[in-house]
Amino acid sequence: MSAGFTEFHTGEFSGFLYQPAQPNGDAVALTHGAGGNCRMPLLLAAAQALSGAGYVVLRYDLPFRRKRPTGPPTGNGSADREGIETAAAVMRTLVAGRVILGGQSYGGRQTTILCAEKPEVAHGLLLFSYPLHPPGKPVQSRTAHFPALRAPALFVLGTTDPFASQDEMRSAIQLIPARTALSVVQKAGHDLRGGKLDFENAVIEPLRSLGFHSHPLL
């Protein structure tokens, strides 16, 4: 059972931290997509479910969102990747176990780019609605860095997501040399709100299959 969350601040970095009642020793840091922030319903629900499974969880805003409350990111994402790396460093101070990084859409994509460049940053990836390509443009694939990923990765995809079909995603994750899993949410779009996202079956159990804790330390 989750113990709720508190605001977390260290230097210029801030977020919302969940300390589970029965920690399993591992941690998850989650961030948002290009049009949202860390208060988006998906991240709220994911953080609650993961905390309930024993993970220390942090949901946080990327640097571009901290600069302005609305609007898309600009530039090549390097500043946002620095923010993700900071989140990973924060989590390593809070747990002795493994750190899983991820988020929704743009946040997940920038996380994978960072982890391709610096594999030591994370032990695992949790990617909601990875934007495999722009809607209607499947030839513009965003997978060039996938062969450099070394951490086990869980992808969660809605069946009506215009950024990737199930077949496209299954093909793409074969480029990753680490273990991968794909959870499909029926009738859900890019925000994963159209269908029913069962976190136990779509997230907690697949993380267990990838080798992560989902039970309290004894």
Image (spheres, grey):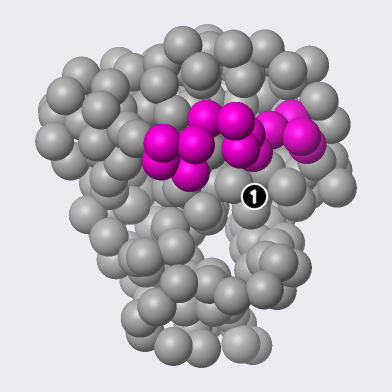
Of residues 141 and 98, the one nearer the viewer is: 141
Give the residue at x 28% y 22%. Answer: 159
Let me know if residue 139 is in the magenta part: yes
Residue 17: image x %, image y %? 43, 63
* x, y percent for residue 71: 40, 78
Q: Is residue 43 left or right of residue 86?
A: left
Left or right, residue 45 beside residue 89: left
Whether residue 2 is visible: no
Tell which of 16 and 72 is nearer to you: 72
Q: Residues within 10 Å of mark 1 (few under 14, many from 20)?
A: many
- Quarter occupied by the N terminus: top left
Magenta-drawn segment = 134-146
- The number of numbered badges drawn on the structure is 1
Residue 204 x, y percent position in the rendering:
39, 24
Q: Which residue is rendered at x = 64% and y = 88% of the image?
A: 11
The image shows residue 188, relative to residue 193, as above or below, that is above
**Nearer to us in this view, 4 or 196:** 196
The residue wearing badge 1 is: 111
Q: Secondary structure at mark 1?
A: helix
Where, by quadrant of the figure, is residue 163 drawn? top left
| Residue 84 image-quadrant placement | bottom right
Q: Main secondary structure of the magenta part?
A: loop
Say whether residue 95 is magenta.
no
Q: Is 88 displayed left or right of 28 in the figure?
A: right
Check the image and report above or below for 205 versus 195. above
Using the rendered image of the protein, determine whether residue 44 is visible from the camera's viewpoint.
yes
Q: Position of residue 193 (x, y in %)?
A: 18, 41
Which residue is found at the position 53% from the left and 55% from the top? 107
Q: Give the image quarter of residue 32.
A: bottom left
Three-letter amino acid code of the residue under disc 1: Thr
Name the residue: 67% across, 43% down. Answer: 112
